[in-house]
């Protein structure tokens, strides 16, 4: 038997986890058919694409982000810039966590890298409102479930996920609480003052944006959960010259630099708060 196509692999993965899904239109359970059609009892249906992902959006959304941005993001993550962060998160995931949802997964590389460092088998699901991001994720990673969807109207049953990852992405805490299993946890990463400071100095030189504060984000997170653990990870490491424009392209900082190729930095600082919340 030959290797499964991306669509066939996605069908097989999603059929195993069929209980995870609910119709984003009527909220009833869904069935996943052998041909890749996903439908509910009210006959609302969605199709697994040949690239190996599902688009669960119920209305058109214009993405701000391009295919090139997600390719750059993947290259930066594959370079190892965030390896220490991935290791830290993997260490925080206990052996009784069976699945994880990356909410705002982009092209999926953070999720894949973290799961590679977890010693036991884990079901990993990524959702993002950007179709380009999910297409890129499905292109490179076919061992995961990838969904285009809106967190305000997600295609998942309540109390489904043991962990929700929210990596430098907007949060929807009410939805996170609905999706978490009892004793489940949200892991949210937010920038601290030194995050990408070498680029920030060039993009926002002599403006108030040269300094960054996440105080409001952390305060809101604290208000949402009864148990919160906050830790900080900071390190500076060399950055290859060819990766500098790609790093700029994958962040809003690049929008404020006229010539990405002219920006020169030899090292970059990762400085993040890791927020872990339980209901």
Image: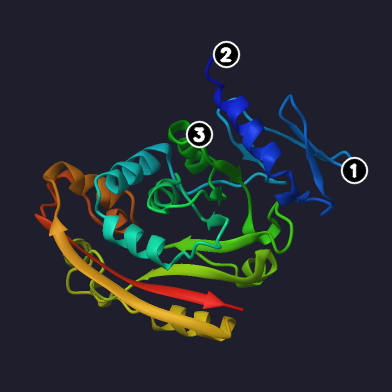
Q: Earlier in the sequence, mark 1 or mark 2?
A: 2
Of residues 60 and 129, the one drawn nearer to the viewer in this rendering? 129
Q: Is residue 5 above or below residue 125?
A: above
- Mark whose residue sits in front, 3 or 1: 3
Q: Residue at x 42, y 68 (%)?
A: 92
Residue 1, quarter of picture: top right
Residue 259 seen from this side: no
Q: Quadrant of the C terminus?
A: bottom right
Residue of label 3: 142
Of residues 61 and 216, the one drawn nearer to the viewer in this rendering? 216
**Does dot 2 land on a helix, a strand or a loop?**
loop
Q: Which mark is residue 41?
A: 1
Residue 233 spot, x, y in % from top left: 28, 71
Q: Is residue 248 left or right of residue 110?
A: left
Residue of label 2: 1
Callouts 1 and 2 close, C-beta under 8 Å: no
Q: CA distance from mark 3 to mark 2?
A: 18 Å
| Neighbours of disc 1 within 10 Å: few (<14), some (14-19), many (20+) | few
Residue 131 spot, x, y in % from top left: 55, 41
- Mark whose residue sits in front, 1 or 2: 2
Callouts 3 and 1 close, C-beta under 8 Å: no
Q: How many marks?
A: 3
């Amino acid at each position: 038997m030959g290797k499964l196509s991306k669509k066939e692999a996605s069908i097989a993965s999603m059929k195993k986890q069929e209980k995870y899904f609910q119709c984003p239109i009527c909220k009833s359970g869904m069935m996943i058919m052998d041909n890749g059609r996903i439908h509910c009892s009210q006959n609302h249906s969605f199709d697994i694409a040949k690239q190996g992902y599902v688009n669960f959006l119920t209305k058109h959304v214009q993405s701000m982000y391009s295919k090139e941005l997600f390719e750059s993001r993947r290259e930066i993550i594959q370079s190892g810039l965030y390896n220490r962060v991935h290791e830290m998160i993997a260490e925080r995931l206990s052996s009784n966590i069976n699945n994880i949802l990356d909410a705002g997964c982009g092209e999926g590389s953070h999720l894949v890298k973290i799961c590679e460092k977890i010693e036991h088998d884990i079901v990993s699901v990524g959702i993002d409102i950007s179709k380009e991001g999910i297409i890129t994720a499905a292109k490179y990673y076919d061992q995961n479930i990838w969904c285009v969807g809106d967190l305000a109207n997600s295609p998942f049953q309540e109390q489904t996920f043991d962990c929700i990852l929210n990596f430098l992405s907007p949060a929807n805490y009410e939805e996170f609480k609905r999706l978490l299993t009892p004793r489940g946890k949200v892991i949210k990463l937010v920038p601290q003052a030194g995050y990408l400071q070498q680029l920030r100095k060039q993009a926002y030189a002599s403006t108030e944006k040269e300094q960054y504060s996440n105080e409001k984000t952390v305060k809101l997170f604290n208000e949402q959960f009864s148990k919160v653990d906050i830790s900080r990870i900071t390190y500076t490491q060399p950055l290859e010259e060819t990766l500098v424009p790609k790093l700029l392209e994958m962040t809003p900082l690049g929008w404020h630099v006229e010539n990405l190729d002219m920006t020169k930095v030899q090292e970059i600082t990762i400085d993040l708060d890791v927020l872990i919340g339980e209901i």
